[in-house]
Image: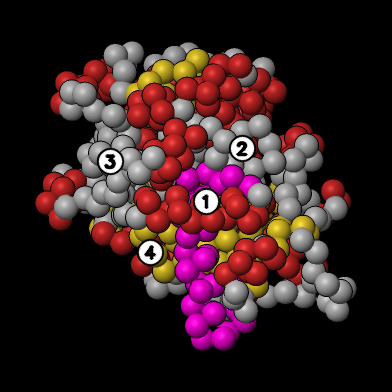
Amino acid sequence: MSNEKIPYKIYLSESELPKQWYNLRADMVNKPAPLLNPETLKPITKEELSGVFCDALIDQELDENTAYFDIPTPIRDFYKMFRPAPLIRAYCLEEKLGTPAKIYYKFEGNNTSGSHKLNSAIAQAYYAKEQGLKGVTTETGAGQWGTALSMASAYFGLDCKVYMVKVSYEQKPFRREVMRTYGATVTPSPSMETEVGRKILEKFPGTTGSLGCAISEAVEKASKTEGYRYVLGSVLNQVVLHQTVIGLETKAALDKYNEKADIIIGCAGGGSNLGGLIAPFMREKIKGERDYRIIAVEPESCPSFTRGKYAYDYCDTGMICPLAKMYTLGSGFIPAATHSGGLRYHGMNPILSQLYDDGLMEAVTVKQTEVFAAAEEFARVEGILPAPESSHAIKVAIDEALKCKETGEAKTIVFGLTGTGYFDMVAYEKFHDGKMTNYAPTDEEIEKGLANLPKV
């Protein structure tokens, strides 16, 4: 097959759907630092986490030695409704740019949630159901995760309570209504429903919220409600594990046509989609089998990697979650109300943080207006309206392809198109009307966010 013309869309067969998730930690030379109990500052135990998370998910979260976890049959059966997802050769974009580079994107938007989030939502809902729970609580930024979890909860007959970052709740009313269609209760965060929400509103009156705030509320609600557990859409290692179906499928599709990636690009908020995309490629890089340039792209308004500090920090604004060692801007950092709600998180997944600290991947920031310009260019030639989050990766993929045009190098670029932007039209409207602005936090704002890091 290596001599055949590569099709626009490379589809794996149903039988080629991954049967296992891959745990990158098993092959890492330097393992991510353990989660800490915020009170004792000692590595947190399964027993200590059991009141917040599902038991099976805790096992996945804490396991750094098991390389592969079998995907239960009910989850694989659900995956078959929208997976394997296509790896698409961006022939039209290549021609428009006049680049010798080959550009591929892994498209994760072929489901009602419009994003990759369903890969982990269905897994977490399955384990909650298996444990005999009544329901789950969660946070959501732009709304893709909340939508995905509401779908998964409905599938397994679970109640679903979603705390949606207030700015996104107001900007994306239709995303909110999709969640309600699937039976979820959606509350703008911070709210007066929880103790931590009331404290945040008292300290930051009029705040537009953040993922850190919403996490705090969802955790409190789960811990104080009988038969409920908290589930998270990104950041945690268990979520990266579930998202490795993206990277495993991507690599299998490239191997099918004997293609080798040179540059792999993904947007980075909490880190789940990026971690899932790069996992099998990073394995080869760690083992010295092949080298790749791996680039994390984050918004200039929330630069966790590029301007944050590698330190232990709370995963939430209310400071009730375990401490994770990660690149962070401080749990009290409230990002600007930009239109890439899924990337407005103060920290980064511990696996990716360790890889970045070890120099195994790069990170860049991009401006909001540049992101939407790239999204528009992509939509006009490739026919998919991308989510603002995904468009961060598009922007850097275009930049790298234009560098190849200058040098004449025919590199192969792969990026993650994590979802569609059809519920993000308010953001596109502001861009087209010239009302969108760029914002970068000042050094003083970042220093203020980092000033209250826990003393570990």
Residue sitting at x 54%, y 56%: 377
The residue identified by callout 1 is 376
Q: Residues within 10 Å of mark 2 (few under 14, many from 20)?
A: many
- Which of the two labelled residues, at mark 1 and mark 4, occupies the earlier sequence position? 4
Which segment did they paint magenta?
384-413
The spot of residue 173 in percent (x, y) is: 47, 22
Secondary structure, mark 2, is loop
Which amino acid type is shown beneath numbered disc 3? Ala
Which amino acid type is shown beneath numbered disc 4? Val
State yes or no: discs 3 and 2 in contact (Cβ < 8 Å). Answer: no
Mark pair 4, 3: CA separation: 18 Å
Q: Residues within 10 Å of mark 1 (few under 14, many from 20)?
A: some
The residue identified by callout 4 is 364
Q: Is residue 17 above or below residue 46?
A: below
Which amino acid type is shown beneath numbered disc 1? Glu
Residue sitting at x 75%, y 45%: 83
- Which of the two labelled residues, at mark 3 and mark 2, occupies the earlier sequence position? 2
The residue identified by callout 2 is 114
